[in-house]
Image (cartoon, rainbow, N blue to C red):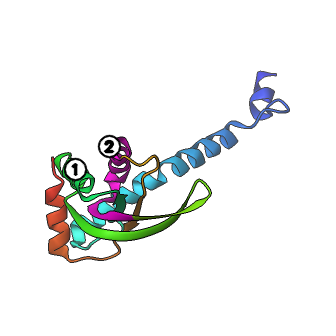
Amino acid sequence: MDRLLSRCPLPGYPRPSVLMCLLILTASFLTYPMLRTLSLQLHSAVTGSYVSGTYSIVFVNCPNEQIARDIARGILDKKLAASVNILPKASSLYFWKGEIEEATEILLLIKTKTSKIHMLSSYVRLVHPFEIPEIFSLPVDQGDVHYLKWLEEGMED
């Protein structure tokens, strides 16, 4: 009888092979992003080529130049980026609480590793005076190899 049960599972219970397949599929799905990133980094190291999206440019608007400078210095001190440009006097029109607002703002152009964007965003939200600071990023598709190496060195701990 025990032999019969091992070959024919009870109704309503999946076979062990089905469970194993589901486990492997779930593990593959969960580890794919990490494995893809590691394989791209390995390819980049071996071939010396740039992997698109490794670096990003982050945009942050600030209410004035002093706040922009303070945030930029904090970002650089914490090695969350290698370079920050402060672009003066951007005219902004936007909806805020149902009304159209108009302001002059200072734009930060932040060059960083894509992997640091989450920490960078958390830091900016912590120190920024706006209730909802504008923080968004664009991946760098291509760039000068020497400049990208300099960016990498600027963020090393």
The furthest residue to the right: 11
Crowd tier of the residue under label 1, counting other residues whose Cα lies within 10 Å: few below 14, some 14–19, many 20 or above: few
**Magenta stretch bounds:** 104-128
Q: Where in the figure is residue 98, as x and y percent of width and height?
A: 62, 57
Rendered position, 38 above or below 123: below
Circle 1 — which element?
helix
For disc 1, the marked residue is 70
Q: Quadrant of the N terminus?
A: top right
Camera-side residue of 112 and 121: 121
Q: Residue at the location (37% across, 44% down)?
A: 122
Q: Where in the figure is residue 109, as x and y percent of width and height?
A: 29, 65
Camera-side residue of 15 and 27: 27
Q: Residue at the location (66% across, 39% down)?
A: 19
Camera-side residue of 118 and 103: 103
Q: Where in the figure is residue 110, as x and y percent of width and height?
A: 28, 62
Q: Residue at the location (35% across, 74% down)?
A: 141
Rendered position, 76 above or below 107: above
Camera-side residue of 41 and 46: 41
Rendered position, 43 above or below 71: below
Q: Are marks 2 and 1 in contact (CB under 8 Å)?
A: yes
Q: Residue at the location (24% across, 65% down)?
A: 86
- Amino acid type of the residue that numbered disc 2 sits on in the rendered structure: Val
Would residue 74 be found to the left or right of residue 135 on screen?
left
Would residue 63 be found to the left or right of residue 9 on screen?
left
Mark 2 and mark 1: Cα distance apart in space: 9 Å
Residue 154 occupies which quadrant of the picture?
bottom left
Q: Where in the figure is residue 92, as x and y percent of width and height?
A: 43, 68
For disc 2, the marked residue is 127
Q: Is residue 109 on the magenta stretch?
A: yes
- Amino acid type of the residue that numbered disc 1 sits on in the rendered structure: Asp
Q: Between disc 2 and disc 1, whose residue precedes?
A: 1
